[in-house]
Amino acid sequence: VRRRTLLGVPVAALLLGGCGTDDDAGLRLMVPNAPGSGYDITARTVATTLDASGVRPGVEVFNLPGAGGMLGLQRLVYEQGNGELMMLMGLGLVGAQHTTPISVTLADVTPVARLIEEPEVVVVTHDSPLRSLDDLVRAWRADPSGLAVGGGSSPGGPDHLAAMLMAKAAGVPPPTVRYHRHDGGGVLQAAVLSKQVVFAVSSLGELAGQVDSGQLRVLAATSHTRADGVDAPTLREAGLDVLFANWRGLVAPPGLSDARRHDLDTMVARLRGSASWQEAIAGHRWTDGYLAGDEFGAFLREQDTRVTQILDELGLNT
Amino acid sequence: VRWQFSLARQFLLLQLGIVLLVVGAVAAVSIAEADAAFRREQGAKLRSTAESLAATDTIRAGMGPTIWYDSLAASAETARSVSGSSFVELTDANGTLLTGLRRGQPATLGPGAGAPGRAWLGIVEHDGPALVAHAPVLDPGHGQVLGLVVVGKMYPSWPELLATATPDLLTYLLLGSALGVAGSMLLSRRVKRQTLGLEPAEIAGLVEHREAMLHGIKEGLIGLDSAGRVTLANDEARRLLGLEGDVTGAALRTLGVPDELLTLLTSGSDEPDHVVVHDSRVLVLNRMPVLVRGRAVGSVTTLRDRTELTSLERELDLSRHTTDALRAQAHEFTNRLHTISGLVQLGQYDEAVSFIIHAGQTQHAISHEVQSRIADPALAALIIAKASVASEQHVELRIDDSTSMPQAADDKLAADLVTVTGNLVDNAIDAVQAGGWVRVAVRDTGDAVEVRVDDSGAGVAREFADQVFGSGFTTKASDGHRGLGLALISRVCTARGGAITVEGSAFTARLPVTGRAEEP
C-alpha cells in the first residue's frame, strides 16, 4: 500500500502540474481606438515587452474604437471586477470625457500607472516658406482663420490642446483657430504634404518617419528639453511660453480586490524596470513617464482640471 | 514467503510495471496538456474574433434601433469562415438570437456570463461541448449594450485529443520501456553480485539458519569487535554473563562484567579452555580472534558452564576421600597384622596383646575425639578419612582443642563444609613434608561455622596473600585444574555471605549458618 502511495505522488503532481498551466483567463489589453493609433502602438509594445521580459507572457491586445476612446472606458466600467483586463489610455481620453454624451469618467476606473511621455512637435513641409517658429507666429497672427492647423486627435485631444495652447501664447484667440482633425499619423502626414494644412501639431512618434527622411521639418517641440535626434528648439526657446507633453498609461476596471490591484501594480513596475522596456521606449522616442497607482490617480485629476479649464476657455466643454 | 521468480525477473517485472504506470501518467498529462493548449490557443483566437466583430461598424449599426438581419447574418458568416471557428451567433441585449436558424429564440450562453457588457470565455453545451467567447456590442454614441457576439469552436473529443498527443506518447513509451528494461537488468546484476549470487530465499534461509544455530547451541557465544562492543551474544552467553536484554552494539565494559572477565574476553590470552569463576559459576572460555583479510576485527569467545561438572567433581571428591581413607586404613591394618604376626611367631604373646590394645585405642581415640567434638557426620567422616590419608604420608593430623560443633549442619552447609575443609586439608597435607603436622579447628559460633586449618609448612608469602583466592593462582605444578581449589572455596564462602582469609599457613573460612545469603 505504501509503495503505491509513493508512486501515486509524482503521478498526481504531474497531472496537477499539467492542469495548472490551463490558464484560459489570460490578461488582455484593450485599446480604445483603431489599430495603428498611438494607443495601439503603445499597447502592443507593452504586450510584446511583457512577453519578451518574461514578466507576463501571452497578453492579448484588442481594439474597441468609438467615441474618442470613451466607448472603451464604458466597456471597462461594464467589466467591473475583472482583474484580467486593462485599458491603454492617455491625455486624449481626458479631453474626450467632456466631448461625448457617454457619462462614465476616469474617476470610475482603477488607475494603474502612467507609462510614457511624448513631446508634441510643430512640423511644416521641407519647402514651406515658414522657416522658423517666428515666421509661423507672424503669419498666424496676421490671418488666424486662414491658416489651417492639422492634428491627429479630436477636439480635447493632445494635438488639439497643444495647438490651442500655442495659439493662446502667440496671441491668437483660440476660438478663431482653424483646426483640422485627421485620423491618425498617416492621414495627417498626407494632409501636410498635400498642403491641406499649413502646419501640423502632433506627437513626434507618429511623424518620426517623415521627419527623419527630411520631408517634414520640425519648427519646435513642446517639451521642456529638446527632443532627441531632432534639430529644433523648444517652444520656450523659440519665444512661446508653452510647456506640454502627451502621455499614456494604463487603467483597470473598477472594483478590483486589493490583492489583484497589487498584482497589476507589481507587474507594471517589473515591466518598467526591465531592460527591454527601456529599449522599446528609446526606439519609439518616448520618455519614461512612470507614475504608479494613487499618484497616477492624482495626476489624472490634475490633468482633468487643466483640460477642463482649457476647454471652458474655448467654449468646447459640453 | 514464496518466491516464484528469480531476483532479476522480479526487478524486471516491477520496473516494467513502473514504466507502464509512468507512461500512463504521461499519457494523461499529454491529454491534459493538449486540452489546455486547445483552450489557450483557441480561446485567444475566439476572443479576438468576437471582440473585432463586436467593434465593426456593420454590427454596431445593424443592431441599432432598426435591426438589419441580413447584414448581421452575412457579417457573422464571414467572420465564421475567416476565423475558422465552428459557429458565430449574434444576440440582442436580452440574449435573443438575431442570426441563424434559431433566430428569435434565446441563445445558449455561458453560465458565467453574468451582467451585460462583459466578455466571457468558457465551455457551453452546443450540440456537444464547445469553447465559446462572448464579446459585448456597445452603442458608439451613448455606450449602452446593444447585444452580444458569440463565437464558438466545438471541443475536440478524447480520441482527437489523444491523437494530438500520440506521437509524443509513443516516444515516451519506447524510451521509458528501453530505459526500464536496461535499468532493471543492470540493477539485478549488481544486486546479485553484491549478494554473492544468492536469491532472496537463500539469503533469508541463511539468516534463519544462523539465528537457529546461534540460539540452538548449548554453549555461550559472544562476539566482540575491536573496540570491545558486542556484535552478537546468544541466549546462553547472556545467561552466563548475566546480561539483560538486547546487548548488541553496547560496549562490554558498560554492561557490568567484572574486570577479570572483561580482560579475558577483550584482550586475554588465546590459550584454550581458560577456566574462570564468575558469579558462583565455573566458566571455561575459548577465545578466537576474528581476522578479515588479515586484519583483526574482533573476537569470538565460547563459554561453557562447568558449574555442574564441578559439583559432580566435588561429590566425587567425597567418595575419593572415603576410598582413600579405606585404602589407607587397609594398608595400616595390613601393617599391624604383619606386626602382630611377627610378634606371635616370635612367641612374644604379651607384646602382641599390648600392641593390639594400643592400636585399637589409638584408632579409637582419633575417631572418638572427632566424633565427640563434631556432631556433623559428613564432616566428621571427612576428617577421620583425612587423618588416615595424612598418617599414610607420615603427616600428623591434629584436632585443635577449641574444636566444637555440637549440632549437625543442614545438607547444604554440610556439603560446603566438606568442600572447604577437604580442600584446605588436602592443600595443607601437600604443603608439609613428612613428619610435619596439620591442625584443623572447627568452631560453631551459633550463626556461623569457622574452619581454621594451619600446618607446619612455610605458609603463604605475604605478597601473595591477596592473590591466592583468584582464579589461576598456584604454587604447584600444572595439573589440569590449577589453583581452582582456593578460588572455589572463596566463591563458596562468599556465596553464603562468609569469607576466607589467610595469614601465614593459617586459612580461616567462615560460613554463616543461615541458608544462602542474598545473591551478590
Image (cartoon, coloured by chain):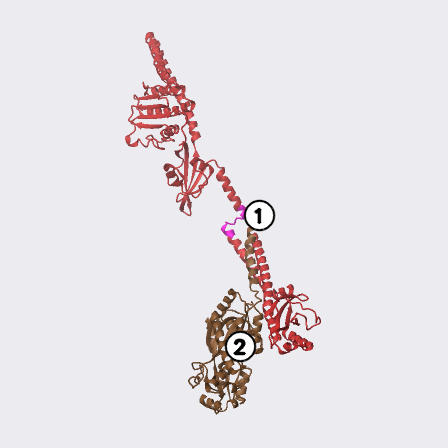
Image quadrant where residue B237 sits? top left
Outermost residue, right direction? Answer: B101
Count of marks overlaid on the render: 2
Query: In front: B282, or B376?
Result: B376
Chain bearing mark 2: A
Amino acid identity at mark 2: Leu
- Could you give the CA–CA distance between mark 2 and mark 1, rounded to whole angstroms? 81 Å
Residue B261 lies, in percent from the top left, at 38, 37
Which residue is under mark 2? A93
Residue B197 covered by magenta stretch: yes
Query: Circle 2 — which element?
Result: helix
Q: Residues within 10 Å of mark 1 (few under 14, many from 20)?
A: few
Chain bearing mark 1: B
Residue B451 lies, in percent from the top left, at 35, 23
Find the magenta span and give its range: B191-202
Colour of the chain lettered B: red
**Residue at the location (54% across, 54% down)?**
A6
Which residue is under mark 1? B3
**Residue at the location (56% across, 77% down)?**
A69
Query: Circle 1 — which element?
Result: loop
Could you tell me if residue B306 is visible in this image? yes
Query: In front: B518, or A183?
Result: A183
Query: In front: A298, or A292?
Result: A298
Q: Is residue A92 above or below residue A216?
A: above
Colour of the chain lettered A: brown
Residue A249 lies, in percent from the top left, at 50, 74
Residue B395 lies, in percent from the top left, at 32, 21
Image quadrant where residue B12 sits? bottom right
